[in-house]
Image (spheres, rainbow, N blue to C red):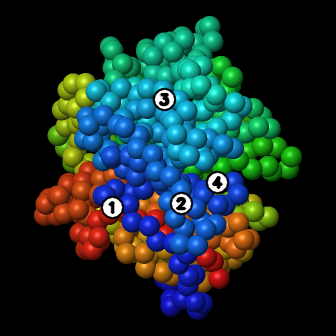
Amino acid sequence: MLLTAAPRDPPHVLLSWRAGQRGLPSIAVSADGRMLFVQTAFPSTVTALDLAVPDHPVAWRASLGEETSAEGLSCCAPPGSPAPAESRLFVNGPDGHVRALDARTGAQVWDRPLARIDEAELLLGAPLLARGKVFVGTGNDDFGVRGSVAALDLSDGHLLWRRYTTGPDADVGIGAGGGDTGMTSWSGDGWMHGGGGLAGPLVFDPMLDLLFYGTGHPAPWNPALRPGDNRWTSGLFARDPATGAVRWFLGLAPHDLYALGAAGPLILATEQGNRVLLHPDANGFLYTLDAASGRMLSARPFVAQTALRHVDQTTARPDRNPAMALATNTTTRGICPAWPGAVGAEGAALLSGTTLLLIAVNRMCMDFEPRQAGFIAGTPFIGANMRITPPVRGASGRVVAWDLVAGRQAWAVDEAYPLIGGIVVSPEAGVIYGTLDGWLRAIGPDSGRLRWSVDVGAPVPGRPLLFVLPDGRHAVAVASGTSGPVASILAGKRDMRDATAGHGYANVLSELKPPADPSGRVTVFVLP
C-alpha cells in the first residue's frame, strides 16, 4: 500500500535547533520532559535545552574534550543517545570514553576510557543504566575489532567486568567445561581480530535479572578467510548483569556468510505468563524466544528473501540457499536481504495492548564478491565488494504490521527508500518514523492510513522520541542529518557512477538528493 495525502494537519514546531556541524545528533529527554539533551558528532558536545521556558534556551553546553584522532572514526558509528538518570547524564564519546555529567550543570562527574581508538575500537550504541551499573558495548566489525560488553559502576565509573565475544571461555564469561570454542571455532588466531561487536541495543529485564544483546558479524566479510562457526559472533547473548557470566547464547548465523550479524531490535513481552524476547533479525526472520532459557519458539520471515530457506526449529541453525553460495573473486548476485539487514537496530516497536509488532523494513538485495584481505590493526578488514540493489518488485522501504498471534503480516505501507532508522508507536500518536528523503510521518496503527507527514529537510536515519512535556502536551523529537555509509553518499563524497561506493549504497540511493543544509538538526513537534 502506498501512502496518500495526509488527512490531518501536521503537528506544530515547538523547537528547531541546528547543530552547526555535519553528522547526526543523538537525543534524549529527562524523565520530567523538561530537558532535551543533544549530543553532536565529532567534535562532540552535549547541549541541554530547557523545554519548559519560552524560546527554549540553552541551559548548559559541555564539550567532551575528545582527542583529534577520533575524528576519522566519527563517520563509522554515531554516538548512542545520552542516558539520563536522576541528576546525572551518561554519554559515550567517539574518543572511546564513557562520561558521567551533572544533568543540571553539565559539569563532568567522572570519565572512563574504555575503547582504544588507535586500534579503531568504538563505543557502540547508547549506555544502559540498570542495577547501579552503566552497561556499554564496544567493537567495530569492519576493522576486525574484538567486540565486548562492559559494566561500569554508576557512582564513579570504575570497571566492574568486561566480557568479550570471542576468545577463551574466561574472556567470554563461560564457566568451566565450555571447551574454549570462542577460539577453536576459528582458524589459528582469527578470533583475536574476529569482530562480533555490539550489534543492537542493550536490554535489561528486571523480572528475569538478565542483560540481553546481539553480537555483530565476524571479520573479515569474506567467509573463506575464517573457516569454522566463528563463535560467538552473529548471535544473541543473555548475561548475568552482576558478573557478566553467560546465561545462554543463541547463534543465528554460524559462520555468517553475508556480514549481517545479529543486528536488530530486542523487545521483551509477556505471553501467557511467560517472558519472551522478540527479535526481528537482520536476516529477515522474526525470532520469538523464551527469554529465560533462550529456547527458540518460532522463526518466521517478515520480508521476501533469497539467502535462507528456513530456520531449524530445534537448533536455530539457518538452512541456506545453495544458489547464494559464495566463492572468492566471484560475484554472487541477488542475495536478499543485503548486508545493511532487513531491519535497523531500533526498527521495531510493540503496540501496547495489542499483538501488533511494527517493523521498519529494508527491502534491499545485493551482489557480493568476496576478496582477499589481510589484518592490520586500525585499518579496514573487509575483503568484499558489494552492490546493493532494490527489490525486483515494490519499494525499498516498508512499514510492516506483524500479527504475533497469527504469525503473519496484518498490513504494510511502502516507502521509496530503505527505512534504516527507527520507529515508535503508541495508541494515541500512531506509528511514527522518518525517511531518508527527509519526511517524518505518522500512520494509524490499525490500518497504516496516513495521519500526517512533515518535511524536516534532511534524512532521518534514527528513531524519533515520544515524550510528554511539562505542561502535559505530547511531543515527538526527531534528529535529522547524515550517518554511516549513507553520509558519504549524501555529502557528495562518493562517485555515484561507482555502484559499490558507500559499501554499495550508491546504487540504491542514486536518485536521493543531498540536503540543502548538511548540518545536523533537532526538531521538536507538539502532536495534534
Q: Residue at image x 52%, y 44%?
A: 106
Mark 4 is on which residue type?
Ser
Mark 1 is on which residue type?
Gly
Count of marks, rendered view = 4
Q: Nearer the viewer, mark 2 or mark 4?
A: 2
Name which quarter of the figure residue 97 lies in: top left
- Is 121 left, or right, of 450 in this rendering? left
Q: Disc 2 designates what residue?
A: 49
Q: CA distance from mark 2 to mark 1?
A: 15 Å
Q: Disc 4 designates what residue?
A: 30
Disc number for residue 20: 1
The reply to whether dot 2 and dot 1 touch (C-beta < 8 Å) is: no
Q: CA distance from mark 1 to mark 3?
A: 26 Å
State the SS at label 1. Answer: strand
Please provide percent x and percent y for residue 109. Answer: 55, 33
Name which quarter of the figure residue 87 lies in: top right
Please provide percent x and percent y for residue 500. Answer: 20, 54
Mark closest to the chain's N terminus, 1 or 4: 1
Q: Residues within 10 Å of mark 2 (few under 14, many from 20)?
A: many
Mark closest to the chain's N terminus, 3 or 4: 4
State the SS at label 4. Answer: loop
Mark closest to the chain's N terminus, 3 or 2: 2
Q: Residue at image x 82%, y 43%?
A: 274
The residue furthest top is 176
Mark 2 is on which residue type?
Leu
Q: Residue at image x 80%, y 38%?
A: 207
Mark 3 is on which residue type?
Asp
**Which one is in front, 389 or 63?**
63
Q: CA distance from mark 1 to mark 4?
A: 23 Å
Q: CA distance from mark 2 to mark 4?
A: 11 Å
Please provide percent x and percent y for residue 516. Answer: 27, 74
Q: CA distance from mark 3 to mark 2?
A: 23 Å
